Image: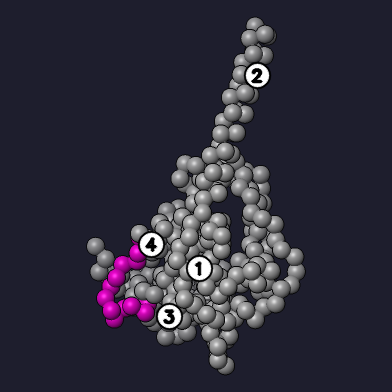
Amino acid sequence: MKRWMRLAVVVGASLIAVAVMGLYTVSDIMMQRRDHPALPTIHASTGPTAVARGERLARLYGCTGCHADTLQGQEWQTDFLTGRLYTANLTRAMPHYSDAELARAIREGVKPDGSALWGMPSESWIATTDAEMADLLAWLRTHPPKGESTPTPTLGPLSRLKLVLGHMKSSHGYVVESRALPSFDAGPQFARGRHLAATVCSECHRSNLKGDPGWTPDLTIAAAYDRPLFIRLMRTGIGMDGKEHGLMTEVSRDRLVHFTDQEIAELHAYLTARAERMP
């Protein structure tokens, strides 16, 4: 009996080893994929207000939240099962990118050689205009190289399994998915609000603004807020119940506070119209 038990343990361990090797082989092949979206014709803006406009966008869109105020990156997630993810030290990376390549990396989630970025929410940048991107580049280019480059991201076994099963994608993979799921078009009079939702709200609530079940709600919820309560939510993160709401509160106080009053009004108008008109 002991002999058979030992044999079973050896066979089981061998099967697990083969499965793990297969998982790493297949996921490595998937991770080595190269994509080469067309380079945009974009150059950093010039002029006395370009950098200020770019900085506001950077804070509103979350550049400084992920890459830190210094843009030198930070540890984002590190554990055996999911892997090691640091946000990049952009001050060290950017000198190796032309303006067009940097714009493509931000909006498409690929490096100059076509290799994938991981964890970069490029899907929330696909609706940014060339003018907005040019302003952002103007501000980014004001940061000279400083600090050390952050470690290269690695995927642990759980992340690799999710990748193979299609439950996880590279940044470019999420871009492709998001382009197929645009937000509801409530009409030209709400175009500006729709643009704000697509570029700011989509990172948490997905490109179609229907949310991520179990994490973020469909933004039809915004129709329950009148204008004053919606303004308070954007400025302070306090919901209609008078309470803080976790990530939403954090994002409001760090990022959404950079909305202008006009932008808040346009966003609220669009989200209300979306809730009323969407099939």
Q: Position of residue 233 (x, y in %)?
A: 47, 74
Q: Is residue 218 above or below residue 231?
A: above
Question: In this picture, is 213 found above or below 218?
Answer: above
Dots 4, 3 in contact, CB < 8 A: no
Residue 99 in magenta?
no
Q: Residue at x 28, y 79 (%)?
A: 188
Residue 104: give its label. Answer: 1
Name the residue rendered at 48%, 60% in the picture.
36
Q: Residue 77 placed where, x, y %?
A: 64, 54
Whole-angstrom CA distance, mark 1 to mark 3, is 28 Å
Q: Residues within 10 Å of mark 4 (few under 14, many from 20)?
A: some
The residues tagged by marks 2 and 4 sit, at their Cα atoms, a distance apart of 48 Å
The residue range painted magenta reads 181-193
Instruction: Say which element carries label 3.
Output: helix
For marks 1 and 3 on the same chain, the one whose residue lies earlier in the sequence: 1
Considering depth in this image, is 78 or 22 the residue closer to the camera?
22
Badge nearest the viewer, 4 or 3:
4
Task: Identify which amino acid the numbered label 2 is placed on.
Answer: Val
Q: 152 or 224, which is in the foreground?
A: 152
Q: Who comes first in sequence, dot 2 or dot 4?
A: 2
Residue 267, quarter of the rendered image: bottom left
Sooner in the amino-acid sequence: mark 2 or mark 3: 2
